[in-house]
Amino acid sequence: MKHNPFITNGLSIGFGLLFLFSLVGQAFSGLAYYNEQQVSSKLDEIGLLQYVTSSSFVVDVAENWQSEYLQFTLLIVLAVWLVQKGSPESKEIEKRGQQSDKEQLVGQFAKPDSPKWAKTGGWRTAVFSNSLGLVMGSIFVASWLVQSVAGFSAFAESQLANLQDPGTWTEYLGSPEFWNRTLQNWQSEFLAVWSMVILAVYLRQRASPESKAVGMPHDKTGASN
């Protein structure tokens, strides 16, 4: 049976639209707040294009992106080895580790419809076997670098406006300003994952793949139905 592509891709489309709406909303609300500060300081207001290309907007966006991608990178990688009894977010306890090629359908154990790089062996299979963590980790690093550069630019503008030496980018990386912005995001992401892992042991959301079936025992691990 052929399904409507808006149904078969509903989750990605839905979250993609939510992302765009929230990013646009952040741009307009951030511009309004920025111009309020400009007016209170008796400075000229700026337009939307100038604001979204400013270090002030870029650092706010990038610091959220890098914390989100750090969260998922760590969850993806650590979940290979770490388990949580009773959580659907965890593998079954007996399946800790990278598992065998047979269990992972790699190389000679691949199926006819398996991805090409899962069959070929060698470095291609090795890369593909870790591609999700590598890409998510790369986006985290890139976002973190953008945050650090944009954050330093915004910090330097503030320092220069007060006739103070902004220092260098490497000095900014070790500053309380940078790590306060960074860690306030990291701690919230770690708390969210921790809460999901633990609460999903005892609580349910009917028909959600992120939850166990309503009647499933609390100690059932690594199962969502």
Image (cartoon, grey):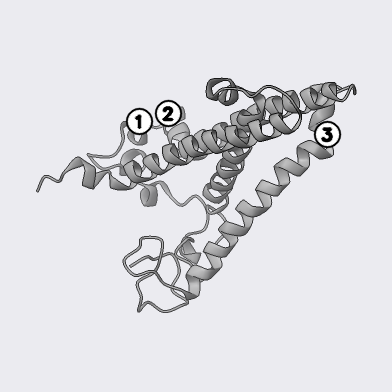
Q: Nearer the viewer, mark 2 or mark 3?
A: 3
Residue 217 drawn above or below residue 206: below
154, 200: nearer the viewer? 154
- Contact, mark 1 vs mark 2 (Cβ under 8 Å): yes
Residue appearing at x 66%, y 35% in the figure: 36
Q: Which residue is mark 3?
A: 174
- Give x and y (percent) for residue 141: 62, 32
163, 156: nearer the viewer? 163
Q: Amino acid at mark 1?
A: Thr
- Residues under labels 1 and 2: Cα distance? 7 Å
35, 51: nearer the viewer? 35
Residue appearing at x 31%, y 66% in the figure: 207
- Give x and y (percent) for residue 176: 83, 40
Q: Amino acid at mark 2?
A: Arg
Q: Amino acid at mark 3?
A: Gly
Taking 43 as reference, is 207 left or right? left
Taking 117 as reference, is 29 left or right? right
Q: Which residue is mark 2?
A: 124
Q: Which residue is mark 1?
A: 120
Q: Is residue 114 visible?
A: yes
Q: Nearer the viewer, mark 1 or mark 3?
A: 3
- Contact, mark 1 vs mark 3 (Cβ under 8 Å): no
130, 19: nearer the viewer? 19
- Residues under labels 1 and 3: Cα distance? 45 Å
Residue appearing at x 40%, y 66% in the figure: 211
- Residues under labels 2 and 3: Cα distance? 38 Å
